[in-house]
Amino acid sequence: MCRRVGRRQRGVRHVHQLAAGLVAGSLVAGRNASDARRAYRTGQAAVALALGLLFAGLAPSLWIFACAWAVVGLSNGIVNVDASTLLLSRTPDASRGRVLARVNAMVRGSSLGAMALGVAAGTVLGPRTTFVAAGSMSVVAAALLLARVRRALGAGQAAAARS
């Protein structure tokens, strides 16, 4: 299958699936009503994103990889919209600019660092092992995030946010 589809075509297809997932995730996240629901959904989406990354590394075929990549996009869209909405709605107007500047600097700096780390890991470990390692570490981090959100919300709010 990989011989019939060129590298460039495979890459374009995966970008489309990631982008379609991002758009769909953004639309799904736009329907969240309360801050508790947004926080809980952010944790759930982070877990789904990490699992998608892990399954992309374990995918036995290009089609399963593409499905995993769409899950990554969907989850990323939900995380982006919900986390940004929480940040904007809970920050006082007077300090919103400073907070957004700091968060954007942190996100962009982390993104550059992650790209450098990904290239280094991909060179040493290969792409499949890099996806599996990154996905495994992300699953642990996302599960810890979701547990922290559950604790912060308390039992009653967490149950209400799930429904």
Image: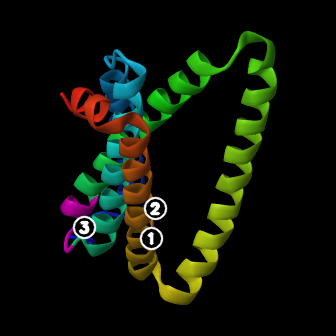
Dots 3, 1 in contact, CB < 8 A: no
Residue 122 part of the magenta segment: no
Q: Secondary structure at mark 2?
A: helix
Picture layout, residue 97 above or below residue 14? above
Q: Secondary structure at mark 3?
A: loop
Q: Residue at x 52, y 25 (%)?
A: 86
Q: Secondary structure at mark 1?
A: helix
Q: Earlier in the sequence, mark 2 or mark 3?
A: 3
* Mark 3 Cα shell of 10 Å, populated few (<14), some (14-19), many (≥20): few
* Mark 1 Cα shell of 10 Å, populated few (<14), some (14-19), many (≥20): few
Given the image, on which type of amino acid does mark 3 rest?
A: Arg
Picture layout, residue 91 above or below residue 74? above
The residue identified by callout 3 is 4
State which quarter of the image contains the C terminus. Answer: top left
Q: Residue at x 20, y 74 (%)?
A: 60
Dots 1, 2 in contact, CB < 8 A: yes
**Camera-side residue: 2 or 65?**
65
Given the image, on which type of amino acid does mark 1 rest?
A: Met
Mark 2 to mark 3: distance in Å? 38 Å
Q: Residue at x 57, y 80 (%)?
A: 121
The residue identified by callout 1 is 137
